[in-house]
């Protein structure tokens, strides 16, 4: 129904942003809501709407290509919108596409909620259909300045990992390496954490 929404980000949580448009605040679930930290003025968020008996949900993306990849992922049996969003949170989209094309199950099972069976289904359903996503740098990250309050940023990043479905054990494993980094923004901490979790 919706292609995108344009408005102002009025709130950021570990699992979603609130985008205000014409006096209405839309809760939009995102893989990395902190990408919108410090963005002034209006922003455009590409959205996918899911209507269930008990809820109407919006899933958001910074770029159209991200939304298209999300739609490919949810077409796979065993991957719902929340799992697809957790997979999308990792910025190495081209790495994921390459793993699917190569049938690299060991790489795919590192994503939260993806077991061996689901990883095999991803390869079966998507192999040969994702070539457009590796041409050029479609998924280049947007640079952001580090915030001064690095403890808060780290805490928010760890909460975002929990919202994506990572276990307390997995989060604990990356907490120490993250603390050893130079102070970063929440967005940067989350990106670093996701890279560590994929190793």
Image (cartoon, rainbow, N blue to C red):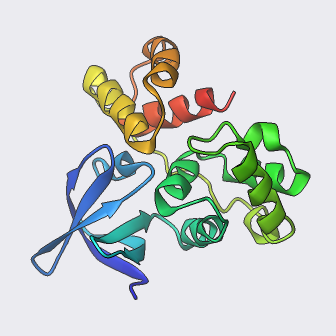
* In the image: residue 129, left or right of residue 85: right
* In the image: residue 42, left or right of residue 125: left
Quadrant housing the C terminus? top right
Q: Residue furthest left?
A: 23
Q: In the image, what residue occupies the spot 25% across and 26% down?
A: 152
Q: Is residue 96 above or below residue 188?
A: below
Q: Position of residue 115 (x, y in %)?
A: 67, 42
Question: Can residue 191 be seen from the camera position used here?
Answer: yes
Q: Nearer the viewer, residue 191 or 130?
A: 130
Q: In the image, what residue occupies the spot 37% across and 42% down?
A: 163
Q: In the image, what residue occupies the spot 46% across and 64% down?
A: 62
**Splitting the image into 4 quarters, where does residue 70 fall?**
bottom right
Quadrant housing the N terminus? bottom left
Q: Nearer the viewer, residue 116 or 70?
A: 116
Q: Position of residue 124 (x, y in %)?
A: 83, 63
Q: Is residue 95 above or below residue 22?
A: above
Question: Can residue 185 be seen from the camera position used here?
Answer: no
**Splitting the image into 4 quarters, where does residue 126 fall?**
bottom right
Q: Nearer the viewer, residue 52 or 143?
A: 52
Q: In the image, what residue occupies the spot 42% across and 48% down?
A: 32
Q: Is residue 34 above or below residue 199?
A: below
């Amino acid at each position: 129904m919706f292609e995108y929404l344009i408005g102002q980000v009025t709130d950021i949580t570990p699992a979603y942003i609130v985008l205000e448009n014409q006096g209405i605040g839309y809760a939009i679930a995102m893989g990395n809501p902190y990408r919108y930290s410090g963005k002034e003025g209006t922003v455009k968020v590409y959205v996918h709407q899911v209507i269930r008996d008990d809820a109407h949900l919006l899933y958001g993306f910074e770029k159209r290509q991200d939304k298209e990849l999300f739609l490919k992922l949810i077409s796979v049996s065993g991957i719902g919108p929340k799992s697809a969003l957790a997979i999308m949170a990792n910025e190495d989209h081209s790495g994921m596409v390459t793993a699917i094309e190569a049938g690299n199950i060991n790489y795919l099972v590192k994503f939260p909620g993806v077991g061996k069976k689901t990883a095999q289904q991803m390869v079966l359903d998507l192999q040969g259909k994702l070539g457009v996503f590796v041409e050029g740098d479609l998924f280049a990250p947007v640079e952001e300045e580090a915030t001064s309050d690095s403890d808060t940023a780290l805490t928010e990043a760890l909460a975002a990992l929990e919202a994506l479905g990572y276990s307390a054990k997995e989060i604990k494993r990356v907490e120490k390496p993250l603390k050893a980094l130079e102070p970063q923004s929440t967005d940067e901490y989350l990106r670093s954490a996701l890279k560590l979790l994929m190793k």
